[in-house]
Amino acid sequence: MEHLHLAAEEDDLYSGYNDYNPTFDSEELDNDAGFQQAVRTSHGRRPPMTAKFPGTAIGGRALGTSFGVESSFGCESRLLKSRMPMASSMGRPMTGAVQDGAARPMTAVRAAGYSSAMTRGSTFDPLGQSKGPAPPLEGKSEDTPDEKVKILEKKVNDLIEESCLAHGLGDLQLSLDRAKEAGRKERALVRQREQSGNADHINLDLTYSVLFNLATQYANNDMYAEALNTYQVIVKNKMFSNAGRLKVNMANIHFKQKNYPKAIKLYRMALDQISNSHKEMRIKIMQNIGVVFIRMGQYSDAITSFEHIMSECPNIKTGFNLILCYYAIGDRERMKKAFQKLICVPLGIDEEDKYIPPNDDTHANLVIEAIKNDKLHQMERERKALAEKFIMTSAKLIAPAIEVTFAAGFDWCVDMVKSSQYVELANDLEINKAITYLRQRDFNQLEAVETLKTFEKKDSRVKSAAATNLSFLYFLEKDYDQADRYADLAMTADRYNPAALINKGNTVFVKKDYEKAAEFYKEALRNDSSCTEALYNLGLTYKRLGRLEESLDCFLKLHAILRNSAQVMWQLANLFEMLEDPHQAIEWLMQLITVTPTDPQVLAKLGELYDSEGDKSQAFQYYQESFRYFPSNIDVIEWLGAYYIDTQFCEKAIQYFERATLIQPTQVKWQLMVASCYRRSGNYQKALETYKDIHRKFPENVECLRFLVRLCTDMGMKEVQDYATKLKKVEKMKEIREQRVKSAREGSARGTRREGSASSVCTPDSVRHLPKKDSEVDIKADSGHSSHGTSAKGERLSAKMRALPGSNEPYEASSQRDIDASYVDPLGAPMERPKTAAKKRNEEDEFADEELGDDLLPE
């Protein structure tokens, strides 16, 4: 009754489903009183039952049950009884009786695979636990031919996969090695099959994969002969289906080898073996044929291929190539038609409006946010950008050719684009029209400016681009106010435009507000960290501010981006020179001459640094190279002439001073140096002729007259009296001139003192006539350049000049002061040495302005 439940007493409709009869609970047999009682009675003393048929599902296990009921199941029971030993042949054995150690048959469990034969005294083991664990599974033998074949096939497939992965990672040599090893393993596999008598079961797919991968890796490693041989093996094997397509790969290799006739032949053979059902494949092959014809200069044949493609399956690349062919043959009308076809090619992409999320649907917003930057949308953007690039390039190419003037051609292209799906490109084309005006040699700048000004009322992107270009134009014209105005306009339209920020910084830089300029350059770098122009200008700004270490950091970062920029290397060398580290400066200049080995100013700078370090031989080498590439640098000529004088080779110094005379014919200094070299070398007659020539050109030169008097006296010439008279007159005139200058200076000084006692305040009119102060020099003055290098060089050259002989010394003197280089300028003003281009480059830190049309306009 404890297992009976009344419906009225049940509160839960689903209760009772977990209740079951404890008779079937094999885990609680030890606690089952009825079962234990049965075991202790006659049932437990019966012999263990064994299965007569060991092939049954649970043969060998003893039957454990709490019921000793015997039943008979027809013929099966009779068969079992006939096989058991019977106590009597006449009657049924007694229940529980054991005869000859065998129990009576238990036919009730015969169908389950159990046997009634149990030996007396055996233990009851219903779960068969006494037999121990099951024996382990037998392993497959690897010695069989089939197993060896399977192992080799797996190794070959693994090697092919490793080869492909290595190629994907860029390790071309490893991919080729794995492909070769896969080929060796595959041949060993074929031999294994032949030895085992399974030659008819060769895996053709595996052989094809091995050969194809090997040929591909040969081609990737530029081993074209081996790749062609491998492809030829595949193509000639008739057992490979569709192997003729590989002739396309063979044609590509011949194209790389510039064997264009062979490439066209293979392309056409591949085209013949591809059915019309593979339309896309045939179109691609025909496009390759057209490209090969362009390389061969056969534009008519190329046009035939491209026109067929544009009629069957038009695409952007084919349309662009068709325009190029028409441009090459100069067909204006067909260029126009091809351009119209190009802008009508469907791109097969969705509209951008699809990615604009609605405001009311949260689920749709999440979906659009997820697909906005997925791979498919990225591919669509790339395809659209490529199409716009081809259209812009085509328009810029054909605009000057389709009409009488390029402006009319641009206008036609703009009208066509406005009526197509690329409406937004019309503005970019008009900006390119303005830039084309500027790039022409006979450009009409007013027309370009007017064209750009028309975009001031357009949308922000176009307005920012146009204003940026206008700012750049006005900056080049040094109209800094207009440049600043349009830079502000560009920043207002697009604050994140780095080009606009750079132009704004440049306009502030020329006003010497370096701190503010640095802020604009930093903001441009925050908006675009790869903007090299902003980083370069920031380095120049720090250099002007005297923050040399920060400037050095900027240029080192820039050098990491632009490894071969000559301007960056020059700035680094100049900064190290200013930081008094000449060794590092020399190292950077040595790197610079690897990029520009024929730059004379770099070579002259290297000579100057080696000279300051005391290495005259190295300095002479680089000065000589600089003179060879640019023989008009006065500083280099002067140094080489002085070097030969120091080394007592005055004859060689003559050619350099003669070169200086040709460059500066109004400077008497170089002619006097030539005459002194002749005199020092013992050629007195040539020296006398030179002095006479100098006297004819500069009759008031005192030094020339003094040497003429000395030479004529020593040589016993009659002209000595004339030159002596002229010398006295010139000296007297010089004294009178000096007295006049001295008295004029004293008079002006007394007048200044009287004015200063009357008033110490300058009127506005007097301020206008005051000279500029040192702080008001032009921006191109070298504010950051250290003066010790220049002054040191000047002192060295002055010392050399002082070491040259004076007018009161004999020419036979053995000291180094044998040549008189002192002179008096005819105008009475001291001569200033000209600055070298190298110094000018140091002093005039050029801006890295935005290039018109390339960096300023968005691509």
Image (tube, rainbow, N blue to C red):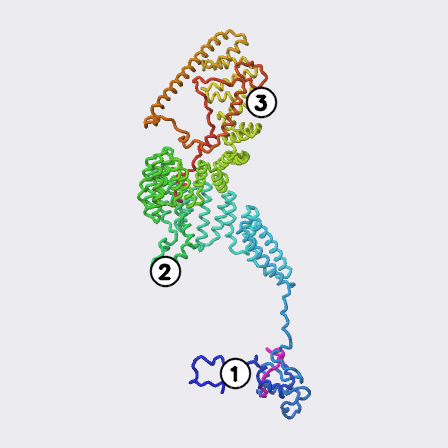
- 573 over 341 or under it: above or below: above
* Closer to the camera in the image, 44 or 819: 819
Q: Residue furthest bottom?
A: 90
- Residue 647 numbered mark, or none: 3
Label total for image: 3
Question: For the residue carrying disc 1, how many other residues have a C-alpha within 10 Å: few (<14), some (14-19), or many (20+)?
Answer: few
Q: Is residue 123 left or right of residue 419?
A: right
Task: Name the mark nearer the viewer: 3 or 1.
Answer: 3
- 547 on left or right of 647: left
Q: Position of residue 623 (x, y in %)?
A: 53, 28
The amino acid type found where label 3 is placed reads Thr
Query: CB under 8 Å between callouts 2 and 3?
Result: no
Q: Nearer the viewer, residue 816 or 189?
A: 816
- Residue 662: mark: none
Q: Where in the figure is residue 779, as x and y percent of width and height?
A: 41, 32
In this orientation, which residue lies closer to the viewer: 208 or 392?
392
Pick out the residue farthest to the right: 100
Query: Is 53 one of the magenta-colored residues?
Result: yes
Mark 2 highlights which residue?
Answer: 362
- Magenta segment: 51-70
Taking depth in this image into account, of 23 and 705 the one nearest to the observer is: 705
